[in-house]
Image (tube, grey):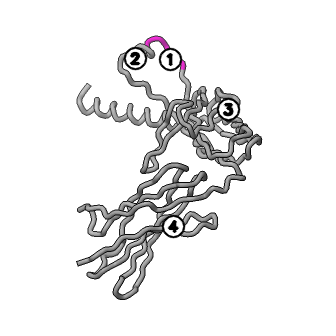
Amino acid sequence: MSVKSFLLAAVCFGLSVLAKSQDFEVAPVLMSFNANPGEIQSQKITVRNHSNFRQKFVFNLSDYDIDEKGTKKSLPLGTSKNSCAEWITVNPSFVELNPNESFEVNVNMVVPADGYSTRWCMVQVQTAKEQEGFEADRDLATGVVIVPRIVVLIKQSPRSNKNYRAKVTGIEELKTAKSSFKSFKVTVQNTGDKIIEGKVYLAVANIETGEEQKFNPESVTVYPGYARSMELSLPVKLSPGKYALAALLDYGNRMPIEGTQLLLDIK
């Protein structure tokens, strides 16, 4: 095989792996429950087989954690104090679908009598392939097993829980040469017990003239007990002078706008 043919074959193999990882669909990918303590709620996950062959699917519960950038990392089941996985049953936990066939799986949330806090976990929907002996030996030798997987995030917070509280805990200028505009790191802390869905934006006021400007907001999601850091940039260049720069958080729920500020001396 020529080098050109080998490269073409490698590209085709890569594309085939990608296509196989995209050959089924899961909806929704976010499920929000609001059951009060002692209540039961049910929702459905729909999985559809888009491939041209029969496929098996398994539904596995796991926990997850969130870093300061909002990236979610899967954790072993039962390792998170914020988990609601033990309150959930997925029925059935295994399905087999023909090409273009779909199936609805029941997700039941049973909240215990003392379940007053916000909890979360995930359902990992993945294909289950029975390997022949030589395939298992090959995968064991290479150390690589490709398993297509789609994650469904699950959140549970009782309707009776009204503990919305958050604040902007910090703003600092980022020294970067990537842009001619000033950029800032803004940190939002969730001090309550509800998942905060808010908007963060910058506002600047010229101390000498009193002229004010507000800029377009960016969305932020912050889980209870966690903080989120995000980078916001001023979309304009400031003229020389002294300014008060504020980072403001609007998270609704009839809560006041939170914020913090720093002083800028533009030369």
Q: Is residue 120 left or right of residue 214?
A: right
In this rendering, the label closer to the viewer, 2 or 1: 2
Q: Residue at x 43, y 25 (%)?
A: 145
Q: Earlier in the sequence, mark 1 or mark 3?
A: 3
Q: Earlier in the sequence, mark 2 or mark 3?
A: 3
Q: Earlier in the sequence, mark 4 or mark 1?
A: 1
Q: Which residue is mark 2?
A: 140
Q: Which residue is mark 4?
A: 258
Q: Can residue 147 be seen from the camera position used here? A: yes
| Residue 222 % position (x, y) | 52, 53
Q: Is residue 136 left or right of residue 81?
A: left
Name the outermost residue toward the top.
Answer: 133
Crowding near pointer 3: few (<14 within 10 Å), some, many (20+)? some
Distance between the alpha carbons at the discs numbered 2 and 3: 31 Å
Type of residue at label 4? Glu
Boundaries of the magenta span: 130-134
Tell me the element at label 3: strand
Closer-to-camera residue (193/137)? 193
Q: Which residue is mark 1?
A: 131
Q: Which residue is mark 3?
A: 90
Q: Residue at x 58, y 28 (%)?
A: 53
Q: Is residue 190 left or right of residue 36?
A: left
Image quarter (top left, top right, bottom left or bottom right) of the C terminus:
bottom left
Q: Earlier in the sequence, mark 2 or mark 1?
A: 1
Q: Quadrant of residue 185?
A: bottom left
Contact flag, marks 3 and 4 (Cβ < 8 Å): no
Q: Earlier in the sequence, mark 2 or mark 4?
A: 2
| Residue 49 % position (x, y) | 60, 34
Type of residue at label 1? Gln
| Residue 164 % position (x, y) | 61, 58
In this rendering, the label closer to the viewer, 2 or 4: 4
